[in-house]
Amino acid sequence: MQKLNILIVEDGRSQREMLRDFLISEGHRVSEAENGEAAIKSVLGNHYDLILLDYKMPGMDGMQVLKEVKRINSEIDVVIITAYGTIETAVEAIKVGAIDYITKPVELDELLILVDRVAERRGLIRENELLKQELGKKGVTVDKIVYKNSKMVELINLANRVAASRASVLIQGESGTGKELMARLIHQLSSRAAKPIIVVNCGALHENLLESELFGHEKGAYTGASSRRIGRFEEADGGTLFLDEIGELSPAVQVKLLRFLQEREISRLGSNASIHVDVRIISATNRDLEESVREGSFREDLFYRLKVVAMMMPPLRERKDDLPALIDHFVEKFSRENNKTISGLTAEARDLLLKYDYPGNVRELLNIMERAVVIAREQYISVDDLPFGGDTLAASRGGKTGGSLRDSLEELEQRLISEAMDKASDNQTRAAEILGMSERMLRYKLKKYNLKS
């Protein structure tokens, strides 16, 4: 575990010395300040990872010190120490930038857990910085994946470790979580980067068309096959084949894919000749494939061949610490693309975006921010530029405001589908890609909601 530079800000000498001796015994480097003014002076002259800050002190109180510390260096983690009677003010301090609070009398076991958590996060941040430097030396950037969340840091590290191998990777997660971006990063980091990464959406094509799409066909293989066609496996030779929505594969295609993973050979439709191809398989699904295996709709042997390395993309609601950076990233991106000058968001609009739970994940946030930038008439995006208000926010958090949660989410789903269809000029394949669902599912939703098709 990484050892931290810690500043204890506490006017009570005995409490301060008790905390100091305990943290030093755990291997951390500890400094002390007996009041807010001394703390600010120490922060200006030293580097600290963590500040343990008493809330109630003579002179500058904890809130004043917290605000000044964050102004000097926003990267310092601050934990508030408070009495039971002032927990509400400690919660208010968290809104200002403290990461947590502990109550007096301080339980040392509780303090150790909190400090270890900070150390673990700091270690991941440092590891991530080193990783980005390493990737930079390879000419690789991860700018398209905006993150600082610890789960995402671990996934980026895993991508870097597995990239050099030929192992199949299965990326799982809800729609819109960035599975294709992760697949492209793995390809970019690998020795195959000079060769293509070919993307196939397995849910967008009928079974017979998908088999031809993947493996190719000979002239006369079926009605309408007027000439030989090279399949996606051959196109990806030397590179990577990304199979999105892998759970949609028919039994027949599963058999042929399994044969490739075992023999590294394929056969075109209408031919018995074997063709050797050097292709790395990365697949993705928003399904529970283990459940599909139990149900018998997905082959167990294929599942384990695909899942040599497994990656689980977290939903956006589990990486809320990435939201501010993602919001700013999309504002900058879409302002540039649409030749608009948007300086940011109003406090109310940002607060609404930070509280929303995003059932459509990063893809939904992207859609919301693009729309907001396009329709914004002022320098700052306001609540009026966002496609939802308090009712939708309450629904996303499980509240009921004039209707059931199901009704509210269905209304949101209808709106997102309509916007995707408009953006795709009614092209169902493109709209399905935008929404992160299969074309078959999109057709079902269009029929269900009686939307244009």
Image: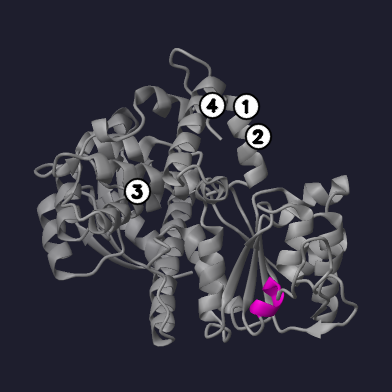
Coordinates of residue 345 in the picture (x, y in percent) = 21, 43
Quarter of the view holding residue 325: bottom left
Tell me which amino acid carries mark 1: Lys
- Tell me if mark 2 has few (under 14), some (14-19) or many (20+) residues whose alpha carbon lies within 10 angstroms of its own: few
Label annotation for residue 408: none
Tell whether label 2 touches label 1 (CB within 8 Å): yes
Eye-nearest disc, 4 or 1: 1
Helix, strand or loop at mark 2: helix
- Which residue was labeled with disc 3? 99
Label annotation for residue 444: 2
The one of 37 and 208 positioned closer to us in this rendering:
208
Of pointers 2 and 3, the one earlier in the residue sequence: 3
- Tell me if mark 4 has few (under 14), some (14-19) or many (20+) residues whose alpha carbon lies within 10 angstroms of its own: few
Eye-nearest disc, 3 or 1: 1
Q: Which residues are magenta?
A: 231-236
Label annotation for residue 448: 1
- Which residue was labeled with disc 4? 410
